[in-house]
Structures are given as structure tokens and as C-alpha cells.
Image (cartoon, rainbow, N blue to C red):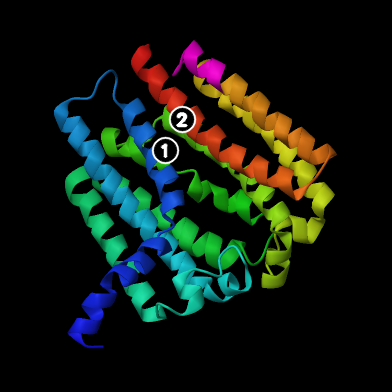
Amino acid sequence: MTAATFFSSAPSRLSQYYVLTKPRVLQLIVFCAFIGMVLAVPGLPSGAEVLKMAVACVGIWWVAGAAAVFNCLVEKTIDAKMRRTSWRPTAQGQLSDRQALAFSVALCVAGSVVLYVWINPFTMWLTLATFVGYAVVYTLVLKPLTPQNIVIGGAAGAMPPVLGWAALRGDVGPEALILCLIIFLWTPPHFWALALYRVEDYRKAGLPMLPVTHGNQFTRLQVFLYTLILFAGCLMPFVYGMSSWIYLAAAMVLGVGFCGYGFALWRHYSDALARKTFRFSLIHLSTLFAALLVDHYVF
């Protein structure tokens, strides 16, 4: 490729690299990490703490992006078989394995350096452990082997608040673990709602997702039961004393809404309802954590 050709195609190439980082997922990851940072600082943060939060978000963003790129690389054959993911540059062959791997390594190294030098080594090691948990343990081991992949592997996806807390405090407090538990309990009903209306994609790809191995009705029941457990888990910040009535009100409304979707999905299934449940799950988590943010500064 000549220099002129490279630069003329640079915007397209950059967009291909960008989509490999799964930007929508990254936004939620960094937001949850940011909430962990905010809750780690009593009252309003100082200027130095705000700067530290910004730098930590960048470091976490890059390492999480590296994990997403590695996931796309490893699953390129699977992605090519699924309508939801067949457009990814790795699945279409628009980016080579070497290019994707180099990008993943570069992001991981850059993010790790940022966290080690400007935040603290503890946060860097926790973030790298999360990378390994998602990119290696979940993607390479759990996902192709067990229908409980999303439950076990959800531990890695639940880590952002812990990373955020560690970035500001240098340790892991019970408040961060409570937030981690909430995301851990949220992940199965969130992901299984998606798997229900994408079941043929997963069957075609040969992945043992719960609707494939145990059927539609069993999965719907699991979604509903997990929304009930999640409802109880979401009350823990108030019970523990890390939030007030503002958060409790939001948790109650959102919890009832998610349980309502779960019950309706169990009793009267349709693909359209599964899509609505999946979309509501995203609203549930983002609004719940936003309520924590508001509550933290109001009281």
C-alpha cells in the first residue's frame, strides 16, 4: 500500500479499529468505573482527584478496549456466522489477525502504563486481571464449554466499580464489592434476554448458550428468577448505609420494572418482548448507577 492510498483510507481504517473496541459496551464500563471513583471520595473531589479520575478512566478504557479487540479476534469465525456480529472488521477480514492483535497489545500496554505510573500499581494489576478474566477465561474457556458461561464469566464484567474505587483509594472496600455484586447479578438476565431472541445465531455458531442447551422456557424462568435476586441485591447500598432514600426510590422503581419484564417474558414470550427486556436492562443499570451519583452529592 502506498502512502497516498493509506492516508486516503485512514478514516475508514481508524473506524474499523474503533468498532473493535465495542464502544457502547466501553461507555457503560467506564461509567460504572467512574461511579466507583466518585463513591470512593467523600464529598466533592478536589481538582487533583478530578484529574486522577480522568486519567484512571482513560487507562481503564484502553485496557477494556484491548480485551474487546482480543475477543473480536478470537471469535472472528463465530462472529462471521452470527447476524449480530458478522459486520465486525475481523469477521469480514477487513483487518488481519496481526493488525487486530497488535492493536489489542498496544491498547493494553498503553492503558497499563497509564494506570501504573499515574494511578497506582494495585489498580493496574486488578485491571489486567479483569482483562485475563474476560479475554482469556471467559472467551477461550467458558463461552464455548458451558451454558453457565455468562454467570461465571460475569465476575470479570462486574469489576469496573472495583477498579474505580481502587484507583482513588488504592484498596478494595465493601462499597465497591456491593456494586460489583449488583453488576454480577444483573449480567445473566441482561444477556439471556438477548440470547433468547438471538438463539438461532448461537445455535448456528455452535455456542452452548442457555436457550440452546436448555430451551426457551427454562431460560425465561432463569431470567425472571435472576431479576428477583437482582432486586434484592440492588437494595444493599441502602441497607449498608452507602446511599439514602433517593437511591432507594430509584432502585425500587427500576427493580419492579425489571421484575415486571422478567415475569412477562416468562409467562408470555415473544422476540419483541425479549428485545424490550434487553433494552430495559441497559436502562436499569445505567439509571441505577446514575441514582447513586446523584444520591452521593445530595446527601
Cα separation, mark 1 vs mark 2, equals 7 Å
Is disc 2 placed on a helix, strand or loop? helix
Q: Amino acid at mark 2?
A: Phe
- Per the image, the residue denoted by label 1 is 32
What quarter of the picture does the C terminus occupy?
Answer: top left
**Residue 123, relative to residue 80: is it above or below?**
above
Q: Nearer the viewer, residue 75 or 132?
A: 75
Q: Is residue 157 left or right of residue 120?
A: right
Q: How dense is the environment of label 2, judged by Cα within 10 Å: few (below 14), some, or many (20 and up)?
A: many
Quadrant in the picture for residue 206: bottom right
- Residue 246 is inside the magenta segment: yes
Q: Nearer the viewer, residue 161 or 82?
A: 82
Give the extent of the magenta segment: 241-250
Disc assigned to residue 62 = none
Q: Amino acid at mark 1?
A: Cys
Q: How dense is the environment of label 1, judged by Cα within 10 Å: few (below 14), some, or many (20 and up)?
A: many
Position of residue 7 measured from the top left corner of the image (x, y, whole percent): 22, 76
- Per the image, the residue denoted by label 2 is 289
Position of residue 8 measured from the top left corner of the image (x, y, whole percent): 24, 76
